[in-house]
Image (tube, rainbow, N blue to C red):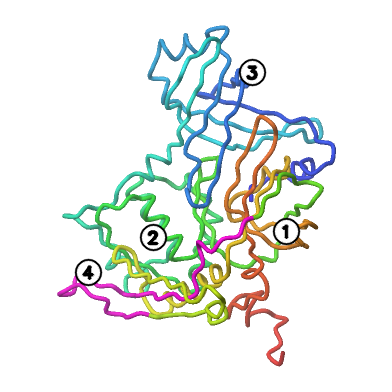
Amino acid sequence: MRTVTVGFQAAMIQPTQNALYRRFIYGGTDYSAYPKTYGPITLDAKQIIAGTAIMDLINSDQSWSNMLLTTPTLLRQSGTIELGIDVGGVPQYVTFFTGELDGTHFISDYVSCQFRNRMMTVLDETVGSTGAAVDYFTTGPEAGNSYNPADMAWSILTTYGGLTAADRDLAIWQAWWTDCNTMGLRLEGNFTGQTIRWILRQIAWLSTSIIFVRGDDQFVFYRYVPSLAAFPVYNDNNTHLVEVKQTLDELLNQITCWYEWDPNATPPAWIGGSTTVNDPISQAQPWGIIAHTEDSTTLWHYDLASATEFCNRTLLRYANPLELCSFDTGLQGFINEPGDLIALTMNFFNYSSTIFEIRKVIFNLNLGKVRIEAVNAASWTSGVFILDHAVHGLLDQNYNPLY
């Protein structure tokens, strides 16, 4: 969830909305008077990044044609799109997109501009090659030269993507590192030309995490773990155009995960072994056994403990049919991001403070509306036991072993 002031959050949920502001900064100059329309901005957990944003700018005074057609090198200047709300008579802003101007299309008295997030170039960079593999299995700082998923992801982004400390939310990354460490997750890899995008998606999958780029151009990392936070509430009063879908497309109830691959063995081999975890309740349903084998020799789990944690957490999320709820909402939704947990109360669908997890958010800055897509997370966010968790496990000070 985006970090905003208490006043900003309070103003967003008022029945009568305060004044709404939009700000467009290009090359360090405020051009907020020029946007004619703002294109939608999408944050999708599966895509990592809001890759492009399109804006139509007023050009009746020829400001943009005189500037950009005369000096094409200005195409690579940075632009930001911000949304603000009146808080006590003073507008407070949140950045929704940062990117470089990638192309223009002049039409009559306006110009359509496409901005491209610079992280797209980073994600398209490759790591290693067929003839010169990059070793992430004899160089790690953890046991057996393995890597905490957080360390591996950040090493890839800095070493091969050229990022610096300013390109990540440090506090969130540290929390992600701690979550992965607590669960004993350890990864190794041997990269032969894979893109950084592919590697990050695979790290997210193997650590049951989410990785995406926020509108302020920073990488954000989360682990899917239970939370006792106060969830934002959406109900029949602040949502409309509600849709609910069910599908078996992502269902899994048996997972086999191989661990400790050795590329240097003769021949290369799985020197660790494999583990298989089942969900017998799901398997007893009409769909039967739906199995998945994780045996990538590009990125893999280091040991049995790490592989077992992956299998358990993955089945917790995917052993039931997917139930996806989509809805429109107002300004309240502008602070939500992929991975956030929200509570839905919708009488027609019998949701009563039912916990959902956001997968996609589409921001409409023109109308001040948000489209949210979220998956029913009740099965994996309630009644969860985590052995060494301060709230959900044996470290809980209120835990009673007799009950």
Graded by Cα atoms within 10 Å as few (under 14), some (14 to 19) or many (20 or more), the crowding at tag 3 reads few
Is residue 114 placed above or below 212 in the rendered structure?
A: above
Furthest residue in direction front, as rendered: 286
Q: Secondary structure at mark 2?
A: helix
Residue range in magenta is 245-274
Q: Are marks 3 and 4 in contact (CB under 8 Å)?
A: no
Q: Which residue is mark 1?
A: 343
Depth check, mark 1 against mark 3: the one in front is 1
What amino acid does circle 4 point to?
Answer: Pro
Q: CA distance from mark 4 to mark 1?
A: 46 Å
Q: Which residue is mark 4?
A: 263
Alpha carbon separation for disc pair 3 and 2: 44 Å
**For the residues marked 1 and 3, what is the alpha-carbon distance in whole angstroms?**
38 Å
| Residue at the image position 69 percent from the left and 57 percent from the top | 342
Q: Nearer the N terminus, badge 3 or badge 4?
A: 3
Which corner quadrant of the image does residue 227 belong to?
A: bottom right
Dot 1 crowding, Cα within 10 Å, few <14, some 14–19, many 20+? many
Q: Is residue 5 above or below residue 342?
A: above
**Circles 1, 3 touching at the beta carbon (< 8 Å):** no
Residue annotated with mark 2: 152
| Amino acid marked by disc 3 | Ala
Q: Which is more toward the observer, 153 or 323?
A: 323
Answer left or right for 121 relative to 346.
left
Q: Is residue 251 magenta?
A: yes
Q: Identify which amino acid the numbered label 2 is placed on.
A: Met
Q: Upstream in the sequence, badge 4 or badge 1?
A: 4
> Magenta-highlighted stretch: main secondary structure?
strand
Look at the picture and state if 175 lies above or below 184.
above
Q: Which residue is mark 3?
A: 33
Q: Earlier in the sequence, mark 2 or mark 4?
A: 2
